[in-house]
Amino acid sequence: MRSVTYSMGVSLDGYIVGPDGGFDWTAPDEEVFRFVIDEIRQVGVHLMGRRLYETMLYWETADRDPSLDDAMLEWAALWKRLPKVVFSTTLSAVQGNARLLPGGLAQEIERLRAEPGEGDIAIGGAALAAEAAASGLVDEYRARVYPVLVGGGVPYFPRQERRVDLELVESRTFTSRVVYLRYRVAR
């Protein structure tokens, strides 16, 4: 069965976006970016909400940007080919290799798990990940922890009133002092 993974950059105090809406502190150096490229190669489909979709929309046409280096062009090519499912009740259409759903996250995950396919089912965005976690559908949490305290904003982990035990599967410290932590949900 395909795993559902939630992978994002996060501040040491647990936020993916700061109180001002900024996330410039998650800009990866070359080593971290290469790691993220390798991680996206393992994804078979990416689920996201409207805000993340709009943020990532740039990458649908980034290959036309002459200022991009080889790594960014590689990321753009991988992202453009990757099937995406956008959950939104406010969008009327999506671009690229994406399809739009107004809801039904749990049903979509179960459908994707049941069909033949390779690669993880990745979830991007805190709100969508929180919905999946509340239903017990997240199999792995993958956090790239940046050495910064932002003091508030959008939390990485969903605020829920249930305990979830995790097993550390992998950890890595990059030269930029970013720490990668990969936890599997203990079932």
Image (cartoon, rainbow, N blue to C red):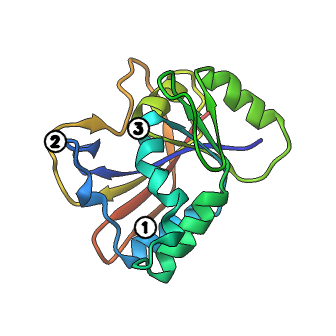
In the figure, residue 5 lies in which quadrant? top right
What whole-number distance in Å separates the C-alpha atoms at marks 2 and 3? 15 Å
**Label 3 is placed on what type of residue?**
Arg
* Mark 1: few/some/many CA within 10 Å (<14, 14-19, 20+): few
Amino acid residing under circle 1: Arg
Work out whether mark 2 precedes mark 3 in sequence or the reverse, and give the earlier one: 2
- Of the two numbered discs 3 and 1 in the rendering, the one whose residue sits closer to the viewer: 3
Q: Three-letter amino acid code at disc 2?
A: Asp
Task: Rate crowding at label 3 as few (under 14), some (14 to 19) or many (20 or more) other CA atoms within 10 Å.
Answer: some
The numbered dot on residue 51 is 3
- The disc, 3 or 1, on the residue closer to the chain's N-terminal end is 3
Q: What residue is rendered at 58% in x and 59% in y?
A: 79
Query: Helix, strand, or loop for circle 2?
Result: loop
Query: How far is mark 1 from mark 2, CA to CA?
Result: 29 Å
Mark earlier in primary sequence (1, 2): 2
Q: Nearer the viewer, mark 1 or mark 2?
A: 2
Q: Position of residue 103 (x, y in %)?
A: 59, 20
Question: For the point 51% across and 27% down, which residue is it?
Answer: 88
The disc label shown at residue 172, or none: 1
The Cα–Cα distance between marks 3 and 1, rounded to whole angstroms, is 29 Å
Does 31 sit left or right of 40 as displayed? left
Check the image and name the residue furthest to the bottom: 70
- For residue 120, above or below residue 91: below
Q: Disc 1 vs disc 2: Cβ atoms closer than 8 Å? A: no
* SS label for mark 1: strand
Residue 13 spot, x, y in % from top left: 22, 45
Q: Residue at x 73, y 44 (%)?
A: 2
Residue that badge 2 annotates = 20
Q: Nearer the viewer, residue 38 or 54?
A: 54
Residue 169 located left or right of residue 27? right
Expressed as whole percent of the image width and height from the top left, the position of residue 23 reads 26, 52
